[in-house]
Amino acid sequence: MAQQEFIIERYNPDSDESYEESFNVETQPGQTVLDSLNAIKWEQDGTLSFRMSCRHAICGSCAMKVNGQSMLSCQTQVDAAAERGDPIRVGPQGNQNIIKDLVVDVNKFLNQFERAETWLEPYEDQDPPEREYRQKVEEFDHWSHASTCIHCGACYSDCTVAAVDENFLGPAALAKAYRFVMDSRDAKREERLKFLSEEQGGIWDCTRCYMCVQACPKDVLPMDAIMELRTLAIEAGHVNNHGVRHHKGFMSGVRKRGRLDEMMLPVQSVGIGRLLTGNLAAHKEMMDYTPGAIRLLKSRKLLTIAQRHGANTEGREHIERIFEEVEAEKHHHDVDAEAFGAEFETAIGGH
Amino acid sequence: MSKYAFWPGCVAQGAAPELYTSTLAVAEHLGMDLVELEAAACTGAGIISDGEPYLQDVLNARTMAMAEQMDLPLMDICSTCVGVHRLAAEKLREVDYRIRINHHLAPEGIEYRGSVDPRHLLWILLEDVGIDKINSMVTRPLEELNLGPFYGCYLVRPERTLEFDANPTRRDSLEQLIEILGATTVTYDGMTKCCGFPILTMNKQNSLTMAGTHLDEAQSKGADALVTPCPLCHLNLDAQQPDAAKVIDRNLNLPILHVPQLLGLAMGISPEKLGLTRHVVDTNRLLNKIGV
């Protein structure tokens, strides 16, 4: 038995009061944070509110912040959470409204799944199979990580974009969307990729900060799913947005000189085509870059950017060669894939 | 003399030149021999891999093969570079994938054998140079300064790739450096979050709200400056600070230091040599505080 201090971030909706409260709990080896919350509720303060159900990291109810990071409290042992006898800080999930103490309103999080229509849309012109719809094992292996989500909200709670943008679909809904994009039984792959590329708060708003990957208790790897969606969306031709222009502009700088070209990248992201055709929004975006450019000029940084030599000559030759080789390899792959696709279509008789 | 294969990254040779010069100044002072990988390419920063993950892996395998060829440890000075290098190194542990990738390196007469452990200067300071040596080099302890760490995502996540369990000093490397140099750490929520830079050209409002929020939080907790191992964070926190202040409607005046600038100051190197005169947010008030 050891004494462990818990500092709990509480909120009382009746008095609209937020406060911290400290509790000391006798803990045993192997005891979880959730066990400790129950001990507090049963023995010290019955008004403490939190969600829980299965206690086996399956239901996803008890996700909350422990020492600042979202996790399942039933899966987190006290000994692992406490450092050098420090108190353990427990708080509600972030990026959602608090109802009471550690209970948040999960509707904002759950609504994102509905927005992304994350359910199977079967091929309508196909008779249902006699038994079940099948997915090849090797195909499933590729995306199975994204199918293990328990909707606990830990990723959404810690997401750095959701923190500043209500409109962001968020890691879990995007990972779930990826799961259906990848599923060969789903008929809406193309529509999904279009939606995820064009929707405000879609795949191009992610910062790649890895918070979701770190927070997820089920190794869904939401950010990896979002990154793969970007690649698939580009391949499917959804390229008319800032994210893709940024990617292409970045690539062209590296291809030419082996280094990112900071002078050209803003112009390329806004879109040279958009600027040339007199797109007003594009010109306004360029104007927005002016104060920043003037500041860089004043601090004598633009000069360094302009003088940058890039990779040495030999390096540049090989970098250019690698770009060409990978492009050619991809082209071969596309031809193979088309041939395979045609064969596959003949085999299943349509779609 | 300790010798490293040195990848400076694009931003240190572009919009944050003071990171490059201060790194060289500090390395010379500490007796580190840096062999710059002049033929290497940008890591892709996760942006090339948006559409071309394979290409990004080839470029990074090539850089790591160069370090391997010289039999030198690889040193990065950018959180993003080290994160992307480590993610590539992780994928390239798989032999079949490495063979496929090496195909593109063969014309250059190099091959990646999978042995490189890319590290940030900050880690190398703590793991190779060592606390005792740094302590002995400090001639101007920064006792008057309260400093907020700002890590940059890829130096703190994903923990799997960064091998925190095997290298526990990496968890709070910035706090350790700040304290070795005699300054006081200001901790705040934003210190391990995203600076917003990766989406600056996609969603300026979101990007600058992130930068502004973290700057405001650190400033209101009494930080005199932030110190960052990531030049991309530096761009959003320093060069974009006036715009971030407007977006969140607050007064911000928080200098942002690169890791080698902070170390250099404590070792008595001149602010000019460390490029502290080339920031957007003026560093004079900070320098006055430590009597420089």
Image: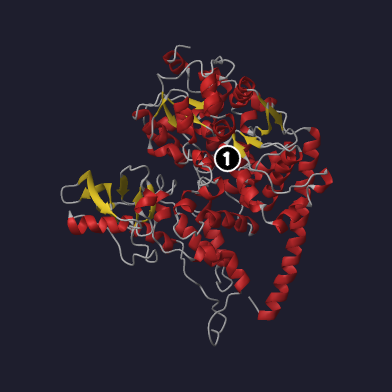
Outermost residue, left side? A15
Q: Closer to the camera, B67 or B100?
A: B67
Q: Identify residue for label 1.
A: B80
Name the residue at 47% across, 51% down: A214
- Give the colour scheme shown: secondary structure
Relative to B66, is B251 above or below? above
How many labels sit on residues? 1
The numbered mark 1 sits on a residue in which chain? B
Give percent across and percent down for residue A157: 39, 51
Q: For the residue carrying disc 1, how many other residues have a C-alpha within 10 Å: few (<14), some (14-19), or many (20+)? A: many
Q: Give the secondary structure at mark 1.
A: helix
Relative to B36, is B204 above or below? below
Give percent across and percent down for residue A261: 66, 35
Residue B128 shows up from this direction: yes
Place residue A305 in its image quadrant: top right
Q: Quadrant of the C terminus of chain A?
A: bottom right
Q: Closer to the camera, B181 or A185?
A: B181
Residue A46 shows up from this direction: no
* Kind of residue sitting beneath label 1: Thr
The answer to whether B248 appears left or right of A40 in the picture is right
Give percent across and percent down for residue A168: 44, 52
Place residue A125 in its image quadrant: bottom right
